[in-house]
Image (cartoon, helix red, strand yellow):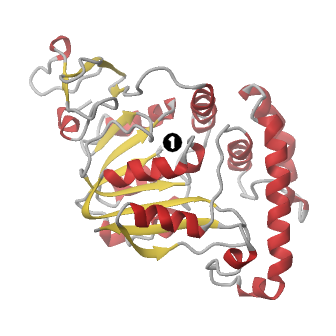
């Protein structure tokens, strides 16, 4: 961990600043590999392990503990960077390539760092925050890149100072917390005035009035001719999925991972593949994406009206909305007023 990171860290319990304990005082500006951080206000200490400050406040509830376990399992097995990472990142953050250079960015729920690496390549300085052990996938880069900072922490109690970041993004993450609205509110506070927040979450089909006004990606306009049927199918798919998850979220993580293999093979079969949760051409990616859908205990779904209200409550002016395909994906880019 580099001393520069202290400028943005805060105690997750009381929000006060943190400092290195005397036992890990830096020598000649060297990075801290192992040691601790202390809060002057509440006297709480947090360990630094493998150069990563571990700022999770206390024991996790069973849902969060299972979430951390499943995502650690998932992201430690995910393939490395994929060719589509950069175009997906630019599309889903809804910010252009020219935006990132020289800005301080928060990756809120970075996983193994797919999009962290893209933001770095675009010239940003990045604080990558995650609850799971998958942060270790970024250690190789963090040890040689002074613009990358790793932090283990909870999005509902982010160990970061308010009004610190030029922009923050959270791509498909906060619906895996106990409260997506609270996670969004926490992220919003970390962005400077005039800065940007980009978030997308799993969509709910909601009412037909809501579903029928969702923005579609180009090439999907044909759906409008069969929209009532599509709406009914999306509702049915969600109900069946939620029913299946009543079982899968209770399975031991290794057992569920093994059971995802037949589902992943099915994902290569024409037509039948749409009964699965991933149709990615790479087998290992399909496997992880099926596991990603079935494993986390927390998986909320939201309409665009709900998510828009989160942005409005946080004084974030909507800049743009993410279009999607058949299944709703609700995403907004907002600018803090």
Q: Is residue 9 visible?
A: yes
Q: Quadrant of the N terminus?
A: top left
Q: Mark 1 points at which residue?
A: 111
Q: Please tell me how crowded label 1 is: few (under 14), some (14-19), or many (20+) other residues with Cα within 10 Å.
A: many
Residue 276: % across, % down: 82, 54
Task: Give the vertical position of 23 relative to 183 (above or below).
Answer: above
Tell me what residue is drawn at x 62 percent, y 31 percent. Answer: 63
Residue 230: % across, % down: 82, 74
Residue 75: % across, % down: 58, 38
Q: Is residue 328 left or right of residue 133?
A: right
The foreground one among 80 and 38 is: 38
Q: Can residue 86 be seen in this view?
A: no
Residue 333: % across, % down: 43, 68
Q: In this view, does 270 lie to the left or right of 289?
A: right
Tell me what residue is drawn at x 15 percent, y 13 percent. Answer: 22
The foreground one among 207 and 138 is: 207
Q: Dividing the picture into quarters, in which one does residue 140 lie?
A: top left
Tell me the element at label 1.
loop
The foreground one among 297 and 277 is: 297
Residue at the far top in the pictured view: 23
Please count the marks in the image.
1
Residue at the far left in the pictured view: 28
Tell me what residue is drawn at x 49 percent, y 20 percent. Answer: 59
Q: Dividing the picture into quarters, in which one does residue 31 lie?
A: top left
Q: In which quarter of the image is the C terminus?
A: bottom left
Tell me what residue is drawn at x 49 percent, y 65 percent. Answer: 309
Q: In this view, does 212 lie to the left or right of 79?
A: right
Q: Dividing the picture into quarters, in which one does residue 123 lie?
A: bottom left
């Amino acid at each position: 961990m580099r001393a520069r990171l202290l400028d943005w860290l805060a105690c997750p319990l009381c929000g006060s600043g943190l400092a290195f304990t005397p036992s890990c005082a830096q020598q000649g500006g060297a990075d801290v590999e192992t040691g601790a951080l202390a809060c002057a206000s509440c006297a709480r200490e947090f360990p630094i392990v493998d150069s990563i400050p571990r700022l999770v406040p206390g024991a996790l509830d069973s849902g969060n503990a299972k979430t951390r376990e499943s995502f650690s399992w998932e992201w430690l097995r995910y393939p490395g960077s994929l060719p589509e990472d950069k175009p997906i990142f630019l599309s889903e953050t809804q910010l252009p390539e020219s935006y990132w250079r020289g800005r301080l960015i928060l990756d809120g729920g970075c996983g193994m760092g797919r999009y962290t690496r893209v933001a770095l390549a675009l010239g940003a300085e990045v604080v990558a925050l995650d609850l799971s052990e998958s942060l270790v996938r970024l250690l190789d880069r963090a040890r040689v890149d002074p613009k990358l900072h790793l932090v283990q922490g909870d999005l509902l109690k982010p160990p970061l100072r308010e009004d610190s970041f030029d922009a923050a993004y959270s791509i498909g993450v906060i619906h895996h917390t106990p409260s997506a609205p609270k996670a969004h509110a926490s992220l919003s506070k970390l962005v400077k005035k005039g800065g940007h927040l980009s978030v997308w979450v799993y969509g709910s089909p909601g009412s037909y009035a809501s579903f029928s006004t969702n923005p579609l990606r180009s090439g999907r306009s044909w759906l409008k001719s069969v929209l009532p049927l599509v709406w009914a199918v999306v509702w049915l798919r969600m109900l069946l999925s939620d029913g299946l998850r009543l079982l899968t979220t209770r399975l031991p993580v290794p057992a569920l991972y093994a059971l995802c293999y037949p589902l992943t093979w099915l994902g290569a079969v024409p037509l039948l593949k749409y009964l699965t949760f991933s149709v990615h051409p790479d087998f290992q990616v399909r496997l992880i994406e099926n596991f990603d859908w079935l494993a986390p205990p927390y998986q909320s779904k939201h309409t665009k009206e709900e998510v828009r209200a989160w942005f409005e409550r946080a004084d974030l002016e909507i800049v743009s909305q993410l279009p999607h395909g058949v299944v709703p994906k609700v995403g907004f880019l907002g600018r803090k007023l």
